[in-house]
Every structure is written in structure tokens, then in C-alpha cells.
Image (cartoon, rainbow, N blue to C red):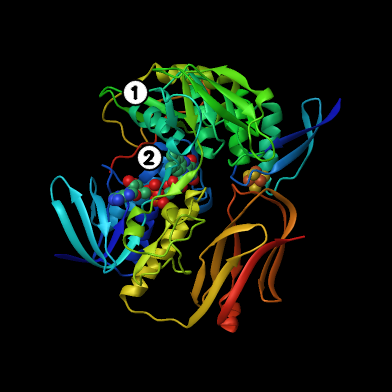
């Protein structure tokens, strides 16, 4: 079945409106993207959407530090990932770039500290 | 009295980039004053990603973006004092600051860069009926609670205002297990970026209710719910459309205001529309040697542009201290037809200049026309323009030198 889907590209702040031509789940063409990354996004969005996850992790000192997934994770796993991250307590000495969870839920993404203390 | 060539007020991205730029341009006697315990400004609590694409070509989170500059400040050995609040600036550039170790300090500066950022419109400014129980926060305050203090301010949330901070917080609180029931926006369009509506609301099925507002807050000690209503074209609530939503938290994301008490105290000329100082292309204010950049000058949506602007101010402060002169011109930049404001508002030197501007409404298929009298300097087609997105036009040194004196208008035409 052929159909069209409109979506907003979230890759950069420009936020292009993409028109995607689909046959079943196969992408036939993408219009409206100002750069190539828009096409990749549209294809991923129609087949296996992913998101970068940013949140916080509790540390042993009782303070939280900011973290991110160093790779986008499947969108439908976001809440499972949150559960896993919220069950983790990181050492009080973690610093920017440290991995607190590796290969989160088998997604291949590591959870990395982003907070910075000068 | 201590003497310092260049004092930078505020250690956020603007203050840090300005300091780094000035240092690299030869200013070594400088000092950053920051009232919080760390450098980094508001970005420390903006833990989401999407920063730095423009500046570094990669997607960074707020703390990572801030760290890039904090590291440069440290590597270059630029002196800074944190936990230090500037309480006053005089017309002759005497700065009063206070901290627990030095007590009250008076510093005579030769040049000053103002980089105090902005704050959110306080809730008192919103006239909603009902008591003021606990559970009402600005989105930025909630962001600080969740991301810095690790504490969730509520479980069932309604957000008033669809600015980016509100959208980001809708996603953040949803991920942490809260139920965000609605985002109400008074205007018929959102002030946030399209990508944030997509990834913060649509991803989680959070409704964005345009042309809606909160008319009443319920609850005595704690918020128990809000009444919302649709508004007509004049933004008056329509009684018949009222509906009650149970919630324990109301977040307000109703825009940002540049933080300019110090600027006004120094007697610097202000722009009523931007809420910041009036500046020339180098970001120099009405007091020679006093510059402003970042959100204290006008609200930016992207920190990348904040850094760019701060570099301009930092280099200009270095030029001022080195007494460098360039060819003078006297040009006023005036917003017309559909354009709300421009930064800079004045051009005093013939050099390539990027003028930032914002439009007053959502427009489609318009031309951005730059003119001097009847002479068209540039004319560029735009498919879509929105108040939430900052636009730019470029003026070349040649055009400015030719013109030398007069008014340049920037407006939208069919
Ligand atoms: C809650 C909030 C969330 C935001 N989220 C985003 C976002 O997600 N993405 C984005 O691109 N932009 C965001 N912004 C805009 C953001 O502010 C800018 O991108 C950028 O941080 C502005 O940099 P700045 O240095 O001008 O201001 P700030 O980062 O606000 O830095 C100003 C600094 O000056 C200090 N200061 C102020 N007054 C004094 C004083 N009297 N004495 C000493 N120090 C003082 C403050 O403590 C602060 O550290 C957000 C703004 C706010 C308010
Ligand atoms: S298509 Fe390219 S330019 Fe447009 S939003 Fe996506 S990444 Fe940005």
C-alpha cells in the first residue's frame, strides 16, 4: 500500500517538515529535507525509530549527576532504559565522560556522565 | 581600589566565551565574576542534548557545551571568582561585588562585559484566579529541582506556555514517571522549536492545546487542579469551553526576561522591546567600554549564537582597551513591517555585520527586505518565519561604508 507521512525532522534546530512516501514500511522517497541527515532520519523513523536519552543518575554521595546515552536507543525502550538507570547508584567520584552503565539493555549504548565540575 | 582592565559579569556561556575571545585577542588582565558556585550558567541544568551543532558540529548536552568553555578558561588561566555576586556598576565602571571570603569589593574596570543572562517571567506577572498553593513552579525552577537536586516536584502536571523549557520539562518529567496532562499555549502557535514539539510532546502523546490558557488554579495548600479554557482572537477566555484538569503541579513556561538591573543601574540606554541594552555592531552599549552579550542583551534560543555574539563582544573589548579605531559610520537599524526588533540597533563602524532579528507573528512566503530609503540592499524569500526562531541578515562592510550615515530598515514584504 502506498501512502504519505509528514514528520518534523528532529536532527537539528532547523526542524524541516519532511514528506515521506511509503510503500508498506519501505521508504520510497523523502522531500522537504534541507540536508541528507533528514533522509536518514525519515528512514529510521519509519522503520526503527531511536532517541538519545538524557537523564540523571544517583551517586553514593546522594547527589545526582547528568548522563546521556552515547548512542540513540530504540524509542520503545526509553521507559525500560529509565528503570534500569534509576536503579543504578554511581560512585561519588564520577566525572564527565565516565561510563556508569555499559551496553544498556543490550542496545549497544553506554550511559556516560555529562556533568562537569571545574 | 583594585584595578582590572576587563571585568566580565556572569560566568555562563556568554561570559566564558567573551573572556576567552578577549584573552586570545591580547587582554590578560581580566576577571570573571559569577554568583553561582560554578561556571556554566543555566546550561548546567539543561542536561538534554542538541547544543553545539552549529559551533562544534556535534550534538552536546548543556553541561558538555559549558564544559568546553570552562576548560578553556582554566587552561588559559583566566582568573574567575565564583560565589561572587555583583551588586552594582557605576557609569565610571566601578563594580561592587560581594562574596564570603573577600567581603565587599570595589573594582575599577577599564572595560566591562555584561553577561548576566536572563530569568523566567515570574508567576506573579500572570493574572490567574485562585489561591497560590504550593505546586506552582516556573519550568526552569522545576528543571533545577529535577536535574541538579534530583527531586521530582510533582506527579500530575499541567504546563502553561509552550516555550522550549516547558517542552523539555514535559519530556523530562514524563521520563521520570510523572503524567503530563496538557501543555496549554495562549497563542495560536507554539513559541518552541518544532523539533521539541515532536520529540518532547508527540513522542509521548502529550496534547499541545493552542489558544488555551489556565483561568483558575484550585487547591488550598497544594494544587489539586486547574481550569483551562480556549481563548478568542483577542485572547480572552471563552466561558463555555472551560474544563477542569486534576493535577498536583502547574509549570509556567511563559518566556524569559533579560536580567538587567545592573545595566539600568549604570544608566545604560535600554531597548524596550528586547529588554536589553541598545548596542552597536560590536555589542558596545551607550557607555563606551561597556559591552553586553548573550541572553542579557536579547533572548537567544540557541546557545551557539550566544557564544558567537560573546566572541564579538570579547574581541571588541580587546580593541577598545588597545585603543583601536576603525572607520566610523552612523547608521540606525530600524525594524519595520512584521519585524519586532533587531540586534544591533546601531552600526558605528563599517565592517561586515550580521543583524539578528525576530518577527512579531507567524508568517508564510514573505520576503525579508533590507532597505535604505528606497534603495533595496537585499531581498530574500522565506517560506516560514516565526517569533520563536531568530533570523539574520548580513550587511557588508562595503554597503555600510558607502552609506556612512542614515537609517537601514529591515522588514517583511509580499
Ligand atoms: C531555564 C532555562 C533553560 C534554557 N534551556 C535552553 C536550552 O535548552 N537550549 C538553549 O540553547 N538555550 C536554553 N536556554 C537559553 C540559555 O540561557 C542560553 O542558551 C545560554 O545559557 C545563555 O547564556 P548566557 O551566558 O547569556 O546566560 P546564563 O547561562 O544565564 O548565564 C548567566 C550567568 O550570569 C550569572 N549572573 C547573573 N547575574 C549576576 C550577578 N549580578 N553577579 C554575578 N553573576 C551573575 C548567572 O549566575 C549565570 O551563571 C535556557 C534558558 C533558561 C533560563
Ligand atoms: S533535514 Fe537536515 S537541516 Fe533539516 S532539520 Fe533535518 S538535519 Fe536539520
- Residue B170 placed where, x, y %? 52, 28
Q: Out of B2 and B276, give the one closest to the viewer.
A: B276
The answer to whether residue A36 is left or right of residue B414 is left
The answer to whether residue A2 is left or right of residue B409 is right
Numbered disc total: 2
- Residue B47, can we see it? no
Q: Is residue B167 above or below residue B260?
A: above
Secondary structure under tag 1 reads: strand
The answer to whether residue B41 is left or right of residue B358 is left
The answer to whether residue A67 is left or right of residue B71 is right
Residue position marked by numbered label 2 in the rendering: B44
- Residue B16 placed where, x, y %? 35, 54
Q: Residue at x 55, y 35 (%)?
A: B161
Q: Which mark is residue A58?
A: 1
Q: Out of B287 and B133, give the one closest to the viewer.
A: B133
Q: Residue at x 34, y 61 (%)?
A: B113
Crowd band around label 1 with a 10 angstrom C-alpha radius: few (<14), some (14–19), many (20+): some
- Residue B294 placed where, x, y %? 43, 55
Q: Quadrant of the C terminus of chain B?
A: bottom right
| Chain letter behind tag 2 | B
What is the spatial separation of the Cα atoms under label 1 and label 2, in whole angstroms? 16 Å
Q: Is residue A81 above or below residue B168?
A: above
Q: Nearer the viewer, mark 1 or mark 2?
A: 2
Amino acid at each position: 500500500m502506498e501512502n504519505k507521512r509528514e514528520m518534523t525532522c528532529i536532527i537539528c534546530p532547523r526542524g524541516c517538515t519532511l514528506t515521506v512516501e511509503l510503500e508498506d514500511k519501505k521508504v520510497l522517497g523523502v522531500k522537504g529535507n534541507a540536508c541528507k541527515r533528514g533522509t536518514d532520519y525519515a528512514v529510521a523513523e519509519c522503520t526503527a525509530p531511536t532517541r538519545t536519552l538524557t537523564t540523571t543518575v544517583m551517586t553514593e554521595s546522594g547527589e545526582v549527576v547528568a548522563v546521556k546515552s552515547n548512542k540513540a536507543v530504540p524509542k520503545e525502550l526509553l521507559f525500560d532504559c529509565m528503570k534500569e538507570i534509576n536503579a543504578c547508584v554511581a560512585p561519588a567520584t564520577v566525572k564527565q565522560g565516565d561510563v556508569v552503565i555499559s551496553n544498556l539493555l543490550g542496545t549497544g549504548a553506554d550511559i556516560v556522565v555529562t556533568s562537569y565540575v571545574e | 581600589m583594585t584595578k582590572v582592565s576587563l571585568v566580565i559579569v556572569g560566568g555562563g556561556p556568554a561570559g566564558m566565551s567573551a573572556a576567552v575571545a578577549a584573552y586570545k585577542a591580547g587582554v590578560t588582565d581580566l576577571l570573571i565574576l559569577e554568583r553561582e558556585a560554578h561556571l556554566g550558567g543555566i546550561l548546567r541544568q539543561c542536561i538534554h542534548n542538541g547544543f553545539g551543532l552549529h559551533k562544534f558540529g556535534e550534538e552536546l548536552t548543556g553541561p558538555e557545551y559549558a564544559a568546553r568553555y570552562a576548560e578553556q578558561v582554566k587552561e588559559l588561566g583566566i582568573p574567575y571568582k565564583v560565589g561572587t555576586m555583583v551588586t552594582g556598576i557605576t557609569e565610571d565602571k566601578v563594580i561592587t561585588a560581594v562574596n564570603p571570603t573577600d567581603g565587599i569589593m570595589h573594582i575599577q574596570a577599564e572595560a566591562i562585559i555584561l553577561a548576566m543572562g536572563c530569568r523566567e517571567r515570574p508567576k506573579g506577572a500572570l493574572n490567574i484566579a485562585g489561591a497560590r498553593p504550593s505546586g506552582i513552579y516556573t519550568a526552569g525552577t522545576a528543571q533545577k529541582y529535577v536535574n541538579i537536586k534530583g527531586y521530582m516536584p510533582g506527579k500530575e502536571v499541567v504546563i502553561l506556555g509552550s516555550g522550549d523549557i516547558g517542552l523539555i520539562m514535559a519530556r523530562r518529567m514524563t521520563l521520570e514517571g510523572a503524567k503530563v496532562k496538557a501543555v496549554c499555549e495562549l497563542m495560536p502557535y507554539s513559541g518552541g522549536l518544532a523539533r521539541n514539539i515532536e520529540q518532547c510532546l508527540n513522542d509521548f502523546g502529550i496534547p499541545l492545546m493552542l489558544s488555551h490558557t489556565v483561568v483558575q488554579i484550585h487547591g488550598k495548600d497544594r494544587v489539586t487542579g486547574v481550569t483551562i479554557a480556549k481563548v478568542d482572537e483577542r485572547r480572552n477566555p471563552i466561558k463555555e469551553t472551560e474544563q477542569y484538569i486534576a493535577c498536583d503541579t502547574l509549570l509556567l513556561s511563559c518566556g524569559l526576561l533579560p536580567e538587567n538591573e545592573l545595566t539600568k543601574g549604570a544608566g545604560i540606554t535600554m531597548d524596550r522591546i528586547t529588554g536589553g541594552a541598545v548596542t552597536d555592531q560590536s555589542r558596545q552599549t551607550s557607555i563606551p567600554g561597556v559591552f553586553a552579550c548573550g541572553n542579557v542583551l536579547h533572548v537567544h534560543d540557541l546557545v551557539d549564537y550566544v557564544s558567537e555574539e560573546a566572541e564579538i563582544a570579547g574581541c571588541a573589548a580587546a580593541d577598545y582597551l588597545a585603543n583601536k579605531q576603525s572607520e566610523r559610520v552612523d547608521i540606525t537599524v530600524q525594524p519595520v513591517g512584521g519585524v519586532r526588533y533587531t540586534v544591533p540597533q546601531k552600526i558605528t563602524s563599517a565592517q561586515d555585520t550580521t543583524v539578528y532579528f525576530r518577527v512579531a507573528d507567524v508568517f508564510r512566503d514573505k520576503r525579508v527586505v533590507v532597505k535604505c530609503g528606497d534603495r533595496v540592499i537585499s531581498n530574500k524569500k522565506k517560506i516560514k518565519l516565526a517569533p520563536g526562531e531568530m533570523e539574520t541578515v548580513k550587511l557588508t562592510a562595503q554597503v555600510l561604508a558607502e552609506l556612512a550615515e542614515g537609517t537601514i530598515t529591515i522588514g517583511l514584504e509580499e
